[in-house]
Image (cartoon, rainbow, N blue to C red):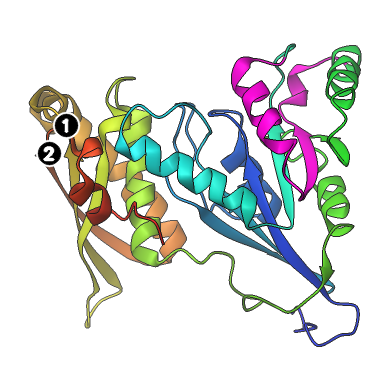
């Protein structure tokens, strides 16, 4: 069992903000570093909407990772909120962990982020993700390309999916942590409320099961979540909100097959995470253009804290 060594003279702690453009593997990397699934994952861009904290603990140190939405030009009010979350996290952090992928050149979105980082005083670590797709020569070319920019304190090649160089990245980040307190209990791996985690798991399954144009217009609201007194069962009632009636039909599917598949996949994963049997009810409702309506954005938990 890990001891609470926060009172030790050399105990270190700090905050690391994980940033990058959409779909470079930020959430996958954070989950891999803490060894638990904290943030949902999908191959569809802008899966993460809120700032999600995951907590890495060992006997000498605590690192609080902050996963943020992918940085890109907003298309609606929800996008405005997500961009604010990402930029805010860069201001309130000890280290910025900028994640890029195996792209052979620096695209416009990465260039825009790099320009922003040039004026930021935090320590900056670059993680080149998806190196399992690169040859040694290609990787060295990428390292050299990013080194020439001259703003990164260190560059670490990783594969979030395979866990390659996780220990190396933790050791690098440890160098930039300073003497500090234990911000969270050692047995705590995220500050997300249970209801938020449940809604995010359901949304992840929706991302997996639905077409490309639908996921961005989906929100999940947990209306009720209660453990039964007489049985080891948690009853969960959730509403899936989408923006169009046509999207509702796609989510439900022919004879309700798709919504049943989404519910089954979500239930199975939630049972593993929560360690209890789950009875899950899913409902689908239409809220037209909710991503541009401030009251709905706030009601779904996307608001400035």
- Does 257 lie within the magenta span? no
Query: Mark 1 = which residue?
Result: 243
Q: Is residue 3 above or below residue 109?
A: below
Looking at the picture, tell me which residue is in the foreground, 33 or 145. Answer: 145
> Which segment did they paint magenta?
106-135
Check if residue 114 falls in the magenta segment: yes
- Residue 263 x %, y %: 26, 44
x and y percentages locating residue 127 in the rendered image = 76, 36
Residue at screen point 86% across, 85% down: 8
Q: How crowded is the residue under tag 2: few (<14 C-alpha within 10 Å), some, or many (20+)?
A: some
In screen coordinates, is 250 left or right of 178? Answer: left
Q: Earlier in the sequence, mark 2 or mark 1?
A: 1
Q: Quadrant of residue 274?
A: bottom left
Q: Is residue 138 above or below residue 67?
A: above
| Image point (19%, 51%), residue name | 295
Residue beneath the point at 79% across and 16% down? 134
Counting from the top left corner in percent of width and height, residue 285 is at: 10, 41
């Amino acid at each position: 069992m890990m001891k609470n060594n926060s009172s030790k003279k050399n105990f270190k702690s700090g905050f690391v903000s994980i940033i990058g453009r959409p779909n470079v593997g930020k959430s996958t990397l954070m989950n891999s570093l803490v060894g638990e699934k904290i943030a949902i994952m999908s191959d569809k861009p802008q899966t993460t909407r809120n700032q999600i904290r995951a907590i890495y603990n060992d006997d000498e140190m605590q690192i609080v990772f902050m996963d943020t939405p992918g940085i890109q030009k907003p298309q609606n009010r929800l996008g405005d909120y997500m961009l604010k979350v990402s930029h805010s996290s860069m201001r309130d952090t000890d280290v910025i962990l900028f994640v890029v992928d195996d792209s052979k050149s620096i695209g416009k979105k990465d260039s825009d982020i790099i320009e922003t980082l040039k004026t930021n005083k935090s320590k900056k670590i670059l993680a080149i993700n998806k190196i399992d797709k690169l040859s040694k020569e290609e990787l060295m070319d990428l390292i050299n390309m990013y080194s020439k920019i001259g703003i990164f304190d260190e560059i670490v090649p990783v594969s979030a999916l395979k866990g390659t160089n996780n220990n190396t990245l933790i050791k690098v980040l440890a160098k930039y942590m300073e003497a500090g307190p234990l911000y969270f209990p050692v047995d705590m791996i995220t500050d997300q409320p249970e209801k938020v985690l449940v809604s995010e798991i359901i949304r992840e399954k929706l991302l997996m099961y639905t077409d490309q144009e639908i996921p961005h217009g989906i929100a999940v609201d947990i209306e009720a979540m209660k453990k039964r007194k007489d049985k080891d069962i948690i009853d969960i009632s959730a509403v899936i909100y989408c923006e169009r009636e046509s999207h509702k039909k796609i989510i439900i599917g022919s004879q309700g097959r798709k919504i049943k598949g989404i519910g089954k996949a979500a239930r199975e994963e939630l049972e593993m995470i929560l360690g209890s049997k789950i009875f899950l009810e899913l409902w689908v409702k239409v809220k037209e253009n909710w991503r541009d309506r401030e009251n709905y954005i706030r009601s779904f938990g996307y608001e400035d804290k």
